């Protein structure tokens, strides 16, 4: 799959060192921040964004994921007609841009590879091709230097291509019928979602990512994607929906509900896509938000077979491992 994205010239495949993730946003991110060229179409559930060749999109009409934009044609002043390509190379012509939403895709970006994070990778030395585990010590634009378990020796380390790493890919689409926590005339909750990877065996810092905040909206559309470094010891994902608030200069956010998705629900070729009912911390019903849900997609992307095509990026740093 990663070979396929690279050959297609996918724009998600060339991050710059220190680039800010479009997916994770920041703690103060708002709906309008950093979103040029977007406008709402009355026939579409999505904010329409300018689509370009090589983009990764989701086609809502047919519930098809991970499509690559092969061709873009203009139709009128703002509309676009797309030709899409699926993973098997089949072309899908005459798709309206109002029926797709653009994502960064499952290919790892440099900001996803944080020092100290634990991951699993496929050893590309045939015929073994075993699954190994390590902790990130340093990185370049296309590789990471891993500290291996002590069983390999006290200072064992190895450089691994991004394309050989297991990725848990998560999309947060929307929330519906959320509880209103804000008082006052026409005030509504300002929701965001925190996605937490639950891996009780890991000694590395917990992986947590979050969407941007959408102000005054009980039916928000986030349409943001995330990439987690995956290990077999991961047990579940928790989707926490919060109302962002500031009281007298002190941040005090309110939990609107949460949903836990266990590993056996996303394992398999298709992964998971659907609506999750929100509950309180104890799994009980939410007063005032009994029907609230969050819609997500979760899928494991395994490393490509036969060795990774390491994407060379201009001015890549000299891969000298500095770990000890």
Image (spheres, helix red, strand yellow):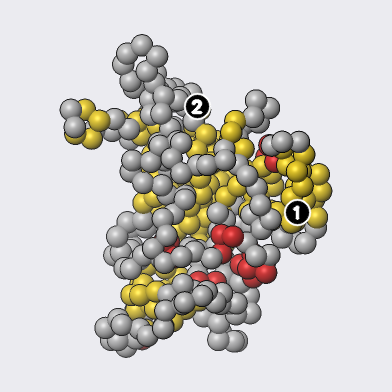
Residue located 19% across and 32% down the image? 249
Residue located 46% across and 72% down the image? 141
- Would residue 202 be visible to someone looking at this image? yes
- In the rendered image, the residue lying farthest to the top is 185
Q: Is residue 212 above or below residue 69?
A: above
Depth check, front residue: 11 or 212: 11
For residue 119, what is the image quadrant? Answer: bottom left
Residue located 65% across and 65% down the image? 9
- In the rendered image, the residue lying farthest to the front is 77
Q: CA distance from mark 2 to mark 1?
A: 33 Å
* Mark 1, other Cα within 10 Å: few <14 / some 14–19 / many ≥20: some
Q: Badge 1 is on which residue?
A: 71
Q: Is residue 67 above or below residue 310?
A: above
Element under disc 1: strand
Which quarter of the rendered picture does the N terminus lie within?
bottom right
Decide if residue 69 is on the left or right side of residue 32: right
**The disc label shown at residue 279, or none:** none
For residue 210, what is the image quadrant? Answer: top left
Closer to the chain start, of discs 2 and 1, is: 1
Residue located 51% across and 45% down the image? 224
Which quarter of the rendered picture does the C terminus lie within?
bottom left
**The disc label shown at residue 219, or none:** 2
Element under disc 2: loop
Depth check, front residue: 112 or 315: 315
């Amino acid at each position: 799959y990663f070979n396929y994205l690279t050959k297609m010239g996918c724009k998600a495949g060339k991050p710059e060192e220190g680039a800010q993730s479009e997916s994770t946003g920041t703690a103060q991110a708002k709906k309008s921040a950093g979103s040029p060229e977007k406008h709402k179409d009355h026939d579409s559930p999505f904010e329409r964004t300018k689509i370009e060749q090589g983009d990764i999109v989701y086609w809502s009409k047919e519930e098809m994921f991970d499509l690559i934009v092969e061709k873009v044609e203009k139709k009128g002043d703002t509309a676009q007609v797309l030709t899409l390509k699926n993973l098997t190379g089949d072309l899908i012509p005459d798709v309206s841009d109002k029926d797709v939403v653009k994502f960064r895709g499952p290919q790892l970006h440099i900001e996803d590879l944080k020092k100290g994070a634990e991951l699993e990778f496929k050893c590309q030395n045939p015929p073994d091709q075993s699954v190994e585990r390590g902790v990130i010590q340093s990185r370049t634009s296309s590789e990471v230097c891993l500290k291996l378990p002590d069983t390999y020796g006290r200072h064992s380390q190895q450089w691994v291509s991004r394309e050989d790493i297991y990725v848990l890919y998560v999309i947060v689409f929307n929330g519906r019928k959320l509880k209103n926590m804000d008082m006052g005339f026409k005030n509504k909750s300002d929701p965001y979602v925190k996605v937490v990877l639950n891996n009780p065996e890991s000694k590395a810092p917990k992986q947590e990512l979050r969407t941007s905040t959408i102000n005054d909206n009980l039916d928000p559309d986030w349409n943001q994607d995330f990439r987690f470094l995956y290990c077999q010891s991961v047990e579940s994902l928790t989707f926490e929906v919060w109302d962002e608030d500031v009281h007298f200069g002190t941040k005090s956010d309110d939990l609107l509900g949460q949903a836990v998705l266990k590993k056996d629900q996303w394992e398999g070729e298709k992964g998971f896509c659907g609506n999750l009912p929100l509950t309180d911390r104890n799994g009980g019903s939410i007063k005032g938000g009994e029907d609230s849900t969050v819609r997500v997609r979760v899928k494991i992307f395994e490393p490509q077979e036969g060795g990774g095509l390491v994407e060379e990026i201009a001015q890549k740093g000299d891969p000298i491992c500095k770990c000890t």
